[in-house]
Image (cartoon, helix red, strand yellow):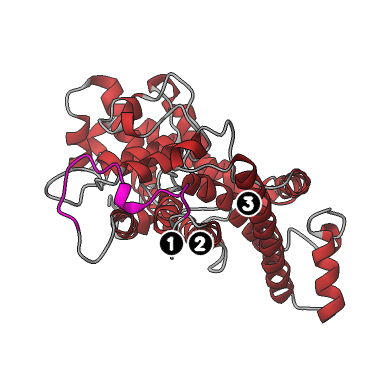
Amino acid sequence: MSLACYALAPQHSLGRLIREPEDELRNPHQRDRDRILHSTAFRRLMYKTQVFVNFEGDHFRTRLTHSLEVAQITRTVCRALGLNEDLGEAIALAHDLGHPPFGHAGEEALAEVLKPYGGFDHNLQTFRILTALECRYAAFDGLNLTAETLEGVVKHNGPLDEPWPEPIAAHPLASRMNLGQQAHLEAQVAAVCDDIAYSGHDVDDGIRAGFIAPAELRELALAGPLVREVERRFGALPRERFAHELVRRLIDVLVRDLLAESRRRLARVAPRSPEEARAAGGPLVAFSEDVGERLGELRSFLRERVYCHYKVARMTRKAQRVVRELFQALMESPECLPESWRRRAGGGGVRALAQAVGDYIAGMTDRYALNEHESLFKLTRYPS
């Protein structure tokens, strides 16, 4: 498929930090995607919380399944807009690699304990994983991805405000990532498709968990007409079938609105290059105002009925306690760190130790964090 003039074509990639021979079978952004898929950090997403902790049910989303769903929607939207599907997919697959165990609860706890040492942000952690922490290749640390993929990751929430975080600002490819400008269109697509994916699957998981009843959804401007359509067509359905029929329609409505509004904006601005698309003065990939407001109402509903449900709140409290106690124990007794992490801390003082402990905890899966907590605190548990 030929790309639109405003797409980032792989043959015009600004390159990698470490130059490598071209691949005969794959373009640079396909190689980026494949390196992310094969990374250790990506595999760990299988056992990292999205909303429900992994052991609460085999059918709830994890960070891994969420990332795959974002990638699927991103490919669809990029294809429809004439954008670089491979680049969009690579960004979508990488966007959550920096999440610590236990989802947002774990991130809040880690940010709290690391506040005296520079704090914690999962987007910045993703960048550090991709550029330094993932150690697979003999010739370099990180994955040596292209500037376009790295830019899409660091701008997942939009252009960066100065001062830029030191790991990003100090990276040799920083000047190629246009840090103060809008993200390229493929990155904009991946960011909005993240919203589509989690809005859909959190409704699905909320229904499956019994936190949401169809009657409640009928009152929402975005979901209500879809609920009534499913009920008119199929009548009473088992919970799982109802959830699937609703969510597939919800995602379709959001994707179609996103395409219609993005095409309208692209036609108005008429960018002739990726650079002109960046300079448009605002995002060109977006929902219409009406659907954006309806989606905002749905998110508020999910926050009240799912994210703040008392069962989720109880697990959040326990998860944050695990993260805080792991950090405190390892800071007080760094000799309890695995040898490779003790070496990373080196002799750099308390700040270097805090960084190493934070990275160690951030890389844990839910179950590994729980096992480490038991190993450190449970007297009858033999150390792992």
Residue receiving disc 1: 2
User: Could you say where residue 189 lies in the image, as x and y percent from the top left?
Assistant: 53, 50
Residue receiving disc 3: 263
Residue receiving disc 2: 79
Name the residue located 62 percent from the left edge and 60 percent from the top edge. 201
In front: label 1 or label 2: 1
The quadrant of the rendering that contains the N terminus is bottom left
Tell me where the magenta segment starts and ends, as one range.
4-22
When asked about the image quadrant of residue 131, the answer is top left
The first of marks 3 and 2 along the sequence is: 2
- Residue sitting farthest toward the bottom: 234
The first of marks 1 and 3 along the sequence is: 1
Left or right: residue 205 versus residue 366 is right
Name the residue located 62 percent from the left edge and 54 percent from the top edge. 196
Left or right: residue 194 versus residue 231 is left
Residue 191 in the image: above or below residue 36: above
CA gap, disc 3 and disc 2: 13 Å
Q: Amino acid at mark 1?
A: Ser
Name the residue located 48 percent from the left edge and 59 percent from the top edge. 71
Q: Amino acid at mark 2?
A: Arg
Left or right: residue 334 versus residue 300 is left
Q: Circles 3 and 2: CB distance less than 8 Å?
A: no
The first of marks 1 and 2 along the sequence is: 1
Q: Is residue 80 magenta?
A: no
Q: Could you tell me which secondary element the residue under label 2 belongs to?
A: helix
In front: label 3 or label 2: 3
The circle drawn on residue 116 is none
- Residue sitting farthest toward the left: 138
User: Could you say where residue 85 lies in the image, as x and y percent from the top left?
Assistant: 44, 58
Q: Could you tell me which secondary element the residue under label 1 belongs to?
A: loop
CA gap, disc 1 and disc 3: 17 Å
